[in-house]
Amino acid sequence: MKKKPLLIIIISVIYILAPVFNLFYFSYMTGLSPSDYLQKSFQSTLEMILFLILFPIGGIAVYAVRKWSYPVFFLVTAWAFYGNYKTWYYNPDALPIWLLIIATILNFVGVAYILIPEVRKVYMDPSLRWWESKPRYLVDIDNLNQSNEISGKIFNISEGGVFMVPNEKLHLTIGDRIQLKFAYEGLDMELNGEVVHFNPQYLKGYGIRFEEFNKDIKQSAKNLIKKIRKNSPRSER
């Protein structure tokens, strides 16, 4: 099973569980029960709600790995910096300086990791989220697109796209949109795709991602994969 990067999972869990840890820690330091702490330590119901749900929202945002995760995560982190400083300033006995420093370092580590260019790309580009990719299967299918002068062989395929090696005369570039026509065991397929990757080492082939298609074509693609799955091994590429 394909899994997300471990650090993304760890940061998510830390943020999701943060309110529980904070509630029991501050209850212990103030000598109050958790319910009494919630009732007496916040000036408004809104502050109490933010205390309970803002960190989990940040954790969910990190775990979701989407473009909107970035502004949500940074908003939560900024609130964490502000909340920790405010608690330390008004109640240094409950949050000693050494604990404030540790909390700040942990927040900084989370932000620094999310800002790493390689990690940021995963959030911004869905094609890089390998754990979301559909299973691919090894095949050897002729691709016949005489009208578009696109022909070659398809070497692996999934519900999301194919890896194709075109004929020697054809050169594609990232972003090109092409039409794929091929047949497999009685199923005729006609799918539109976009070139999203080129691998110069492996057969000098191209990764083609299927574009949005209607319900009938989508069902045909699923039927195709069902047939291929019975006859072909999964691809690790």
Image (cartoon, helix red, strand yellow):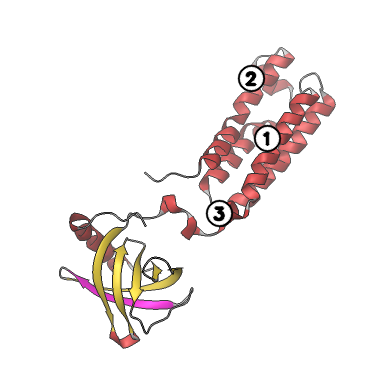
Image vertical order of residue 60 relative to residue 218, above or below: above
Which numbered tag is attached to residue 226?
A: none
Image-quadrant location for residue 76: top right
Would you say 109 lies left or right of 68 here? right
Q: Secondary structure at mark 2?
A: helix
168 or 136: nearer the viewer = 168
Q: Position of residue 30 (x, y in %)?
A: 74, 15
Mark-to-mark CA distance, 3 and 1 = 21 Å
Name the N-terminal-most of marks 3 and 1. Answer: 1
At label 3, the amino acid type is Tyr
* Residue drawn at x 62%, y 36% as measured from the top left: 55
Which one is nearer the viewer's eye here, 41 or 219?
219
- Which circle marks residue 123 in the picture? 3
Q: Is residue 182 magenta?
A: yes
Q: Where does the C terminus fall, quadrant-wise? A: bottom left
**Residue labelled with disc 2:** 24
Q: What stretch of residues is rendered in magenta? A: 177-184
Residue furthest out toward the right: 89
User: Tag 2: Cα neighbours inside 10 Å, few (<14), some, or many (≥20)?
Assistant: some
- The numbered mark at residue 106 is 1
Q: Secondary structure at mark 1?
A: helix
- Mark nearest the camera among 2 and 1 is 1
Mark 3 and mark 2: span between their CA atoms? 33 Å
